[in-house]
Image (spheres, grey):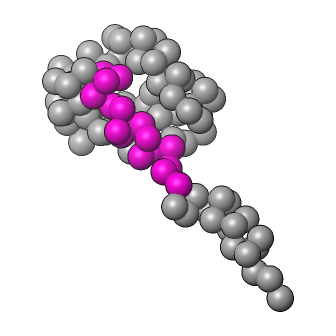
Amino acid sequence: MDLGPLIDELLVKYRISHDSLEHSIREKWPELVGVANASYSHPLVVERNLLVVLVSHAVVRNELFLHRTAILEKLRQLPGCAAIKGLALRSG
C-alpha cells in the first residue's frame, strides 16, 4: 500500500511544512505598520476574515486604527491574505 499521496494530502491540509498565514503576516508586520508600531503590536490570528492584533500601547492602538485602511491594502497584497476584511485591535 502506497501512503505517499495520503501523506502529501495531510501535509497540505494541516499546513505541515508550510508557513501558516499568521506566520507570513508576522514576518511582514514591521513593513505593514512601521517598525515603531510593530514593536508594540503583534498579529495573533485570522478569525472570520479579521486579523486579530494584540496592541500593548494605547497610542499605537490609535495609530493602527487611524491607518487601518492603508494597512489592509498592504496586507491584502500578501499571498493568501486577499480575503481579510478588517483588523480587530485588542489591548494586552
Residue sitting at x 35%, y 23%: 32
The quadrant where residue 10 appears: bottom right
Could you tell whether 45 is left or right of 60 in the image? right
Q: Residue at x 42, y 11 (%)?
A: 70
Most extreme residue toward the right, as rendered?
1
Q: Percent position (x, y) of residue 31?
A: 31, 24
Count of numbered labels shown in the rendering: 0
Residue 86 appears anywhere in the view: no
Q: Residue furthest bottom?
A: 1
Q: Position of residue 24 (x, y in %)?
A: 44, 41
The answer to if 32 sits in the magenta stretch is yes
Give how far across and how far down residue 67 sits, in percent: 36, 12
Query: Residues in magenta?
Result: 18-33
Please, is residue 20 above or below residue 15 in the view? above
Quadrant in the picture for the N terminus: bottom right
Residue 77 in sight from this viewpoint? yes
Image quadrant where residue 38 sits = top left
Residue 42: give x, y in percent of width and height. Answer: 29, 39
Residue 23 vs residue 86, the one in the foreground: 23
Residue at the image point whose x is 73% and y is 65% from the top: 9
Q: Main secondary structure of the magenta part?
A: helix
Quadrant of the image for the C terminus? top left
